[in-house]
Every structure is written in structure tokens, then in C-alpha cells.
Amino acid sequence: MFGANRYFASMRASYIFILCLPLFLGACRPAKPVAVVPPKPVAEVAFDTLAVIKDLAAEYKNGMLTRCVIDSAVVYFGAINAPDAGAEAYDIRGKKIGECYFSTNRVDPICEKMYDCQDLYRVSPNIWGQPGQELKLVK
């Protein structure tokens, strides 16, 4: 009886070693370098976009208007100066393309992809604790 337990214990250890061997061998390989892809250049803002910026700034005159880049495209975010108001995303033609209402969990994927943001307008005083900013037109 004593010999059978020792036999099964050594067999179990052998199986564990054989099953874990690929894990150990895979961990010793050097990691492949990951190519860093620089972001695509931002497309030039068309002349008619200035009218869109003015219209959005008029709509969010009691809030904030921000210009961001998403997948090399220019996107505008407008937010109202109110707690838990959220924001709305617009393309360069002024068409609404997304909602960013974190308080009600209505968050479109576009809200998490933005980078290289610039504030174009911000009302003063505001709930963000930032200084007010007059409308800054971007060409």
C-alpha cells in the first residue's frame, strides 16, 4: 500500500511537469518588438468648417466647445456648463455623431478614442474650475 501511494505521487508530479513544460519554455523566449505606429496626420479643416464652429459655439454659449482628433479625423465636443450634463460629439460638418453621458451610462465608443484636444471656447464662470476662453477659430 505504501509503495502504491509513492508511485502515484511520482506519476502525478511527472504529469504536472510535462503539462507545465510548454509554459516554462514559452516564458524564456524573448518578446517580439512591437512596432509603434505614429498617428496619421490630421486632415486640413475645410473653410466651411469655420461656420460650423461658430454655430456650435452659439449652441454651447453656456458651456464648452472642444476640438479633438479621432482616427485622424477632426471631431468637436460640446458640453453644457451643468453637473452631470455630459457632452455630444459632432463631425466637421456639424452632424451629431455621438453622446458622452457618463452619468447615465450612455457613452458611445467615440468618447474614449479622442486625443490631441484643444479648447475652442469656455464660458466663465464654469463648473470645471477653468478660466473662461473666448472663441478661438482654428484653421
Image (cartoon, grey):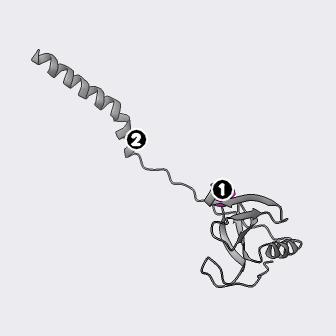
Spot occupied by residue 57 in the image (x, y as percentages of width and height): 79, 75
Q: Gap between marks 2 and 1, in whole Å?
A: 39 Å
Corner quadrant of residue 63:
bottom right
- Up/down of 3 relative to 14, above or below: above
* Residue at 85%, 73% in the rendered image: 55
As rendered, which of 21 and 63 lies closer to the eye?
Answer: 63
Residue with the mark numbered 1: 107
Of the pair 17 and 115, the residue shown nearer to us? 115
Q: Amino acid at mark 2?
A: Gly
Pick out the residue farthest to the top: 1
Residue 79 visible in rendering: yes
Q: Is residue 8 above or below residue 74?
A: above
| 9 shown above or below 64 | above
Q: Which residues are magenta?
A: 107-111
Residue 73 visible in image: no
> Can residue 108 be found in the magenta stretch?
yes
**Quadrant for the C terminus in the image:** bottom right
- Specify the quadrant that holds the N terminus: top left
> Which residue carries the number 2 mark?
26
Mark 1 is surrounded, within 10 Å at the Cα level, by few (under 14), some (14 to 19) or many (20 or more) other residues, namely: some
Looking at the picture, tell me which residue is in the foreground, 84 or 26: 84
Kind of element beneath mark 1? strand
Tell me what residue is drawn at x 70 percent, y 68 percent.
68
Magenta region's main secondary structure? helix
